[in-house]
C-alpha cells in the first residue's frame, strides 16, 4: 500500500523538476519575508491536555463507521468522550470522507469532525493528489473577496462535496441546542478540509458564536493569501508530530504555505512539545529533513497516546 509521502512525491516530482530551483530559496514566501527561524517556546503536556486533548479524542471518532458514530458505540474512541449527541453524520469513506456534527454538552459546544485519508481506498487517495492551486470559491467565504486566495484543488473539491449539508447541519444544531461555540477538527486530509469548514462556518454564523479550529497532521492547503486569511479570520491551532512528512507537502516552492498556530511534538517521549511562532517555522515541521521522514509519525502517537487510525474502532 502506498503511503502518503510516496504518493505525493510521485505527483510532485515532474512539476518540481521543471521549476528553476536555483532561483527559488527552499523556504521563501511570496511576500519576500524569507525563512522563518523565530525561536520556539516549550509547551507542557498539561497545557496540551487542557487545550487539545478533547479535540484529538473527538477527531479519532471520525475514523469510525457512521453507524457506530451515530450510536456512539465505536469502542475506545467513543468511550474516551462520553455524553455526546450526534446530530448528523455523512460521507462514503472515499471521495466524501466521513464526518459528523455533534452536541457536546460538557463543553457547551457543537463539534464538527472530519475523517482523514483512507489509504486503503483509491477514491480517498485521489482527494490528496489533485495538487493544483485554484481560486477559492469566494461565494462560500464572502470576507475573502479580492484577496487572490488560491487553495489546493483536491482539498477544495472534497470540501465542496459536503459543504452545503454540513453548514445547514451546523446552523440547525446551533438553533436547537442554543450553544455559542463550535469546534472544528480533523486529521490529515480531514485537517485540510476542516480549515475550509471552519472558515466557512465563521463567515456564516452570528459574531457571538465562537468558532475554534484545532487539527492534527495538517498538510499545506493553499497559497500565502490563504494562510493569511486563516490567520486573520478563524485562527488555526494545528499539531505536527516529529518527522511526519505530510505537514511538509505540498512544498513551498509550488506556492503553498502554512498558517500560524503550529505546535510540534519533537520526539517520541510524548513530553517534549514546542510552540512555533509565525508561518512555516523552520524550527518545527517545515525544517524536517526529507532524508529523515517517518510515515508512522503521521498516525501518532502525538500526546497522551493519541493515535489516529481506523484499527481503534469497533465497527
Image (cartoon, rainbow, N blue to C red):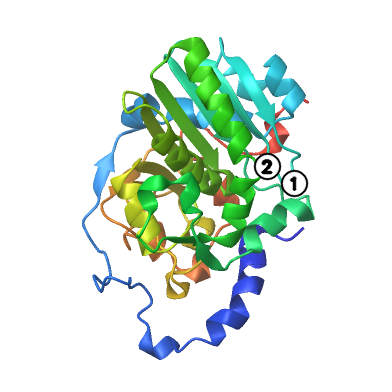
Q: Is residue 198 visible?
A: yes
Q: Which residue is labeled 2 in the image?
A: 97
Task: Relative to 74, say whether 150 is above or below.
Answer: below
Camera-nearest residue between 191 and 309 = 191
Q: Which mark is residue 4?
A: none
Label 1: few (<14), some (14–19) or many (≥20) C-alpha neighbours in 10 Å:
some
In x, y percent, where is residue 80? 56, 19
* SS for callout 2: loop
Q: Quadrant of residue 11?
A: bottom right
Quadrant containing the N terminus in the rendered view? bottom right
Q: Residue at x 52, y 67 (%)?
A: 133
Task: Tell me what residue is drawn at x 73 percent, y 48 percent.
Answer: 95
| Residue 74 seen anywhere in this rendered image of the structure | no
Q: Look at mark 1 in the image and give the residue it sits on.
A: 94
> Is residue 307 left or right of 55 when viewed as pictured?
right
Number of numbered callouts drawn: 2
Q: Distance of mark 1 from mark 2, alpha carbons?
A: 6 Å
Give the position of the C terminus as an image quadrant.
top right
Say which of 193 and 83 sits in front: 193
Amino acid at each position: 500500500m502506498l503511503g502518503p509521502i510516496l504518493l505525493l512525491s510521485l505527483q510532485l516530482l515532474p512539476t518540481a523538476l521543471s521549476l528553476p530551483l536555483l532561483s527559488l530559496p527552499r523556504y521563501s514566501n511570496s511576500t519576500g519575508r524569507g525563512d522563518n527561524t523565530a525561536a520556539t517556546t516549550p509547551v507542557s503536556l498539561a497545557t496540551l491536555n487542557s487545550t487539545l486533548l478533547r479535540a484529538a479524542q473527538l477527531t479519532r471518532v471520525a475514523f469510525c463507521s457512521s453507524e457506530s458514530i451515530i450510536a456512539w458505540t465505536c469502542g475506545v474512541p467513543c468511550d474516551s468522550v462520553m455524553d455526546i449527541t450526534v446530530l448528523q453524520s455523512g460521507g462514503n469513506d472515499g471521495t466524501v470522507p466521513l464526518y459528523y456534527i455533534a452536541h457536546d454538552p460538557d463543553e457547551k459546544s457543537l463539534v464538527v469532525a472530519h475523517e482523514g485519508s483512507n489509504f486503503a481506498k483509491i477514491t480517498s487517495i485521489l482527494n490528496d493528489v489533485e495538487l493544483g492551486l485554484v481560486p477559492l470559491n469566494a461565494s462560500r467565504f464572502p470576507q475573502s473577496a479580492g484577496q487572490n486566495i488560491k487553495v489546493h484543488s483536491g482539498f477544495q473539491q472534497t470540501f465542496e462535496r459536503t459543504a452545503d449539508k454540513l453548514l445547514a447541519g451546523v446552523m440547525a444544531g446551533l438553533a436547537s441546542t442554543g450553544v455559542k461555540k463550535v469546534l472544528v477538527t480533523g486529521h490529515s486530509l480531514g485537517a485540510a478540509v476542516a480549515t475550509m469548514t471552519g472558515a466557512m462556518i465563521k463567515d456564516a454564523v452570528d459574531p457571538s458564536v465562537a468558532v475554534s479550529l484545532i487539527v492534527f497532521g495538517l498538510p499545506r492547503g493553499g497559497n500565502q493569501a490563504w494562510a493569511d486569511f486563516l490567520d486573520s479570520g478563524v485562527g488555526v491551532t494545528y499539531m505536527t508530530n516529529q518527522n511526519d512528512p505530510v505537514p511538509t507537502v505540498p512544498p513551498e516552492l509550488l506556492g503553498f504555505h502554512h498558517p500560524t498556530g503550529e505546535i510540534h511534538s519533537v520526539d517520541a517521549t510524548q513530553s517534549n512539545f514546542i510552540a512555533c511562532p509565525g508561518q512555516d517555522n523552520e524550527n518545527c515541521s517545515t525544517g524536517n529533513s526529507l532524508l529523515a521522514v517517518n510515515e508512522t509519525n503521521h498516525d501518532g502517537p502525538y500526546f497522551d497516546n493519541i493515535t489516529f487510525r481506523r484499527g481503534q474502532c469497533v465497527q
